[in-house]
Amino acid sequence: MKTLFKTLFIDHWPRKLLSLILAIIIFFVINKSLTTTKTITNVPVRIENIPSGKTVEGLQSNGFLNKKVSLTLSGNRSILENLNTNDVQAVIDATGKEGEWIATITKNSLRFENSEVNIAQGIRRVSQQNFIVKLTKIVS
């Protein structure tokens, strides 16, 4: 029994320790580099910087639209697997926009509830169906 213990743990221990450390490092590097794609439905959309005298169809008093968007996110598996609809908002900037346009949502236009973790760094690509925003004059 002593020789088995000695063979497993004591003989050549520096090599075994180095192998264990390298295995742990390789595990974490591969785990961080795995990518996946996830579709999140019913993401709330907020419009910012609406020109004065204008409004957006379906805009609620809290700044969110009454319609929601589905987003397909590609990125780091460990970040995306814990992400859900309640964690994400899409923010669209209306600066300099007129009439009707197709809004583009990028990873920079996403806002996340858990601001302690930089989720945007783990996202590589955001895609969505065409999201049409229509500016109209405020009728008073």
Image (cartoon, rainbow, N blue to C red):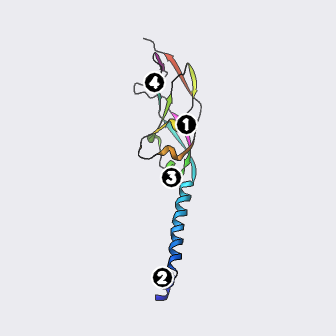
Q: How crowded is mark 2: few (under 14 residues within 10 Å), some or many (20 or more)?
A: few
Q: Mark 3 points at which residue?
A: 78
Residue 64 forms part of the magenta stretch: yes
Q: Give the range drawn in magenta.
A: 53-73
User: Disc 4 or disc 1, which is closer to the eye?
Assistant: 1
Expressed as whole percent of the image width and height from the top left, the position of residue 5 reads 47, 84
Would you place residue 59 above or below residue 114 in this image?
above
Q: Mark 1: which amino acid? A: Thr
- Name above or below for residue 96 compared with residue 81: above
Q: Name the residue under label 4.
A: 59
Please tell me whether mark 3 or mark 1 is closer to you in this view.
1
Q: Earlier in the sequence, mark 3 or mark 1?
A: 3
Q: Are marks 3 and 2 in contact (CB under 8 Å)?
A: no
For the residue labelled by badge 3, is the local secondary structure a helix, a strand or a loop? Answer: helix
Q: How far apart are marks 1 and 2 (CA)?
A: 55 Å
Please name the residue that numbered disc 1 is placed on.
Answer: 106
